Image (tube, helix red, strand yellow):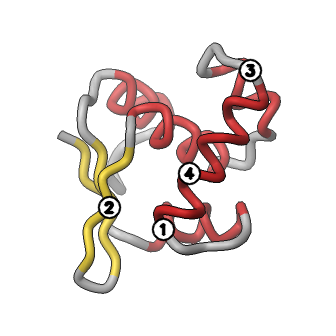
Amino acid sequence: MSNMCLGDIYTFFKNTKNYYLAQKNKTYRLTKREAESLLHLSMGKTMKTTAELINCAPRTVESYVKQLKDKLGVHYKTDLADYFWNNPIKWF
């Protein structure tokens, strides 16, 4: 992924069907909407902007963020961003 530009990442995410994050010998499967939300939030976008980018309501993004926090066992959005940038991510 290090050789990809930002546009490539967005295109890749858009055309991918399965998303996984791995940490400490555990793999987490993300829904497409969770993965999209995580991508945009990790790029510093607000929930409102993220909602506009993935064509849903801000409350829906809040729901995805809560699901991600519960799934990954973190408490803050910054923890989610750290998770995204510091862990292997697989897209299939």
Q: Which residue corresponds to the image point at 65% horizontal and 52% vertical from the top-left? A: 66
Q: Which residue corresponds to the image point at 23% horizontal and 82% vertical from the top-left? A: 25
Q: Secondary structure at mark 1?
A: helix
Q: How many marks?
A: 4
Check disc 4: other Cα within 10 Å, few if <14, some if 14-19, many if 20+.
some
- Measure the C-alpha gap from mark 3 to mark 4: 16 Å
Q: Position of residue 18 (x, y in %)?
A: 24, 38
Check disc 3: other Cα within 10 Å, few if <14, some if 14-19, many if 20+.
some
Q: Point out the tag, 1 or 3, that comes first from the N-terminus.
A: 3
Q: Disc number at residue 67?
A: 4
Q: Which residue corresponds to the image point at 25% horizontal and 30% vertical from the top-left? A: 17
Q: Quadrant of the C terminus?
A: top left
Check disc 1: other Cα within 10 Å, few if <14, some if 14-19, many if 20+.
some
Q: Point out the tag, 3 or 4, that comes first from the N-terminus.
A: 3
Q: Point out the tag, 2 or 3, that comes first from the N-terminus.
A: 2
* Residue under label 2: 28
- Measure the C-alpha gap from mark 4 to mark 1: 8 Å
Q: Point out the tag, 4 or 1, that comes first from the N-terminus.
A: 4
* Residue under label 1: 72
- Measure the C-alpha gap from mark 2 to mark 1: 8 Å
Disc 2 residue type (three-letter): Tyr
- Give whichever of 9, 51 is nearer the camera: 51
* Residue under label 3: 57
- Give whichever of 43, 18 is nearer the camera: 18
